Amino acid sequence: MNPPRREPQTGQALPLAMVLLVAVAAIVFFMFNSGQLVQEKIRITNTADAVAYSAGIFEARVLNYDAYTNRAIIANEIAIGHAVGLASWAKYAGKTADTIAPYMYLIPYAGPAIANALYDVKNAMDAYTPLLAATVTLHDAAINALAASQLAVHGLGNLIALASRKALMDEVTRKNDPDAKVDVLPVADDFAGFTQRYASRDERKRMGLVVHDGRDAFLRSRNWNFGLVVLCTGLQLRKRGSTELIDMVDGWKSMDTLSVHQYRIRRFRCRRSENPIGFGSAFSDDGLDDAAYSYAGSRSTNPEASYRAESTVADGFEPPTLSGGAIPAFHELSEAALKQDDPRTSLTIRVSKPRAAQIFSGGGGTVQPMGSLDLYQGALAKNESAAVAKVEVYFERPDGKNKLFGTEETGSLFNPYWQARLAPVTAGERALAQVRQGLQLP
């Protein structure tokens, strides 16, 4: 017996399929829209990190430029000191040769040749010193150019550096997202006060002390003794001389003297008489007040030769200069920064993008759903998305401790070891960014 035949049902699944199709379309739209929002957020966040890090690198490069130029200024100052010292020594050597030469004729046969050789030494020294004077002029010009370049980088009150940093941040923002803009959170930016220009006489002594302590053995002392004195009887040659940075800032002056000291007993007392043989001086600027300097004991040991050296100046000195070889105004960490155990500066920035420039349903997308599908209405505060990033500029030697002293080195603008890194944003800085966007905080 055959079962009854059923008639096929038609049209019953169409309403269900339509409902399912609408649900799938809504889910797909929601997922796509959410993805667009996430993409926009990632893009803004990456832009903020790139802008902050670029600004930090800019600040580190400014600090390192200051350090390099300060070291170059110090090197040129030492070079001026050497030129002045060599000129003084050359003048003393020429004067010594000129003093000794007439006595060489007393030596049989070889005497005239020796005397002529000494006169040649004197002439060579006189021809040598104008060349040294020219190097003083060149090094002084380099020093002033380096100091001027620092001022060009910073400007008065760091205005040029801050303006250049803002231009860089705008450029990085535009390259990453043309529709975004960057703002600096004012209370989270201390770069303007992190450095200062040391211009007064007392302030410039900070670099002068570094220069003074950096003198080598030739500049510090050119002393020696020759001869024997026994029981206040005999002869002794005493050479004295040094090169000094006058008052740590004003300029360089050098003195060299050589005298023979004769000891003898007269009226039951030991007497000493000085006979100057050679003497000379040089300076980077005229009128330097060097009354407090003995030039490695020259004024106390060879007073007569020292007195004559004052008027026996190397040829070409005083050389023409812009500042007389003085320590120029320079940039260094501010006094407040130098008081820190670990000086560092930080910057927090905020990158924002208007809602209309973002491609999602509630933004600038062409599809604008209505009704219950408008899930993002009012989701963006002040009709914009924003991201916050922070950068920190710090000092750290790449080779660890200072190899010369074996100790940790404190940050300053005499060594170019400034680096930048992204840093966590503090709760206070994030709250400031939220207030700036118009959010109500608890």
Image (tube, helix red, strand yellow):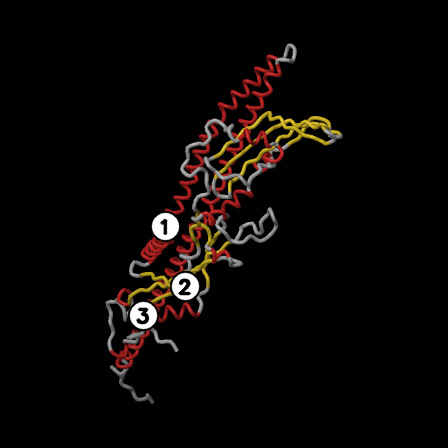
Give the mark nearest the N terminus, 3 or 1.
3
Q: Is residue 169 left or right of residue 425?
A: left
Where residue 15 sits, quadrant-wise, is bottom left
Q: Which mark is residue 33?
A: 3
Task: Name the residue tied to disc 2.
Answer: 188
Q: Secondary structure at mark 1?
A: loop
Give the mark nearest the N terminus, 3 or 2.
3
Q: Secondary structure at mark 3?
A: helix
The 10 Å Cα crowd at callout 2, few under 14, some 14 to 19, many 20 or more, is: some
- The residues tagged by marks 2 and 1 sit, at their Cα atoms, a distance apart of 22 Å
Kindly give the residue lying farthest to the front in the view shown: 267
Q: Position of residue 55 (x, y in %)?
A: 39, 55
Q: Position of residue 277 (x, y in %)?
A: 60, 25
Amino acid at pointer 2: Ala
Give the camera-side residue of 52 and 141.
141
Give the mark nearest the N terminus, 2 or 1.
1
- The residues tagged by marks 3 and 2 sit, at their Cα atoms, a distance apart of 35 Å
Amino acid at pointer 3: Asn
Task: Name the residue tied to disc 1.
Answer: 155
Q: Which mark is residue 21?
A: none
- The answer to whether 87 is drawn above or below residue 66 in the figure is above
- The answer to whether 113 is drawn above or below residue 175 in the figure is above
Q: Is residue 363 left or right of residue 65?
A: left
